[in-house]
Image (spheres, rainbow, N blue to C red):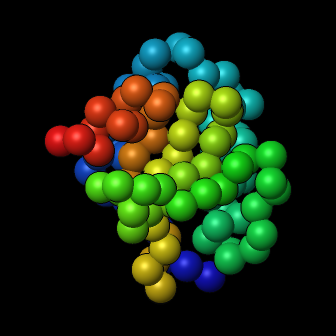
Amino acid sequence: MLKIKIEKGYKKDIERDKKSGKYSQLDFDILKHIIETLQEEKPVDPIYKRHPLLGTLNKYEAMHVKSDWILVFKIEKPFLILVMIGTHPQVYKKSRG
């Protein structure tokens, strides 16, 4: 089982999204399920569209918790590193600096 490492940006993102009221408890439950599945190194359901990222984020992967709510992470054994979460514009804005 991978250990979870949470980056500062992810902590800020998740707090922002909790306060926004835009996401339901079910959305956060799905996010938790995705993280637990990754942590256990099990295959994640293809509906979440796991894919590698390109450009400045080429060392990371992403999964769609919802159509426009994206988890960005990296696996560096023994760690699952939670990097950021947000909409497409939020994630790509951060990736540009």
Evaluate whether residue 28 shows in this view.
Answer: yes
Q: Is 43 placed left or right of 57 in the picture?
A: right
Residue drawn at (70%, 49%) of the image: 49
Coordinates of residue 43 in the picture (x, y in percent): 77, 69
In the image, 1 versus 69, the foreground residue is 69
State which quarter of the image contains the C terminus. Answer: top left
Does 96 sit above or below residue 55?
above
Q: Is 78 placed left or right of 51 in the picture?
A: left
The answer to which image quadrant residue 15 occupies is top left
Q: Is 18 placed left or right of 25 in the picture?
A: left
In the image, 29 versus 75, the foreground residue is 75
Residue situated furthest top in the rendering: 21
Residue drawn at (46%, 16%) of the image: 20
Coordinates of residue 33 in the picture (x, y in percent): 71, 53
Residue drawn at (43%, 56%) of the image: 54
The answer to which image quadrant residue 19 occupies is top left
Coordinates of residue 79 in the picture (x, y in percent): 45, 77
Residue situated furthest left in the rendering: 97
Does 41 sit above or below residue 61?
below
Does 2 sit above or below residue 70?
below
Evaluate whether residue 14 shows in this view.
Answer: no
Residue situated furthest bottom in the rendering: 78
Coordinates of residue 95 in the picture (x, y in percent): 29, 44
State which quarter of the image contains the N terminus. Answer: bottom right
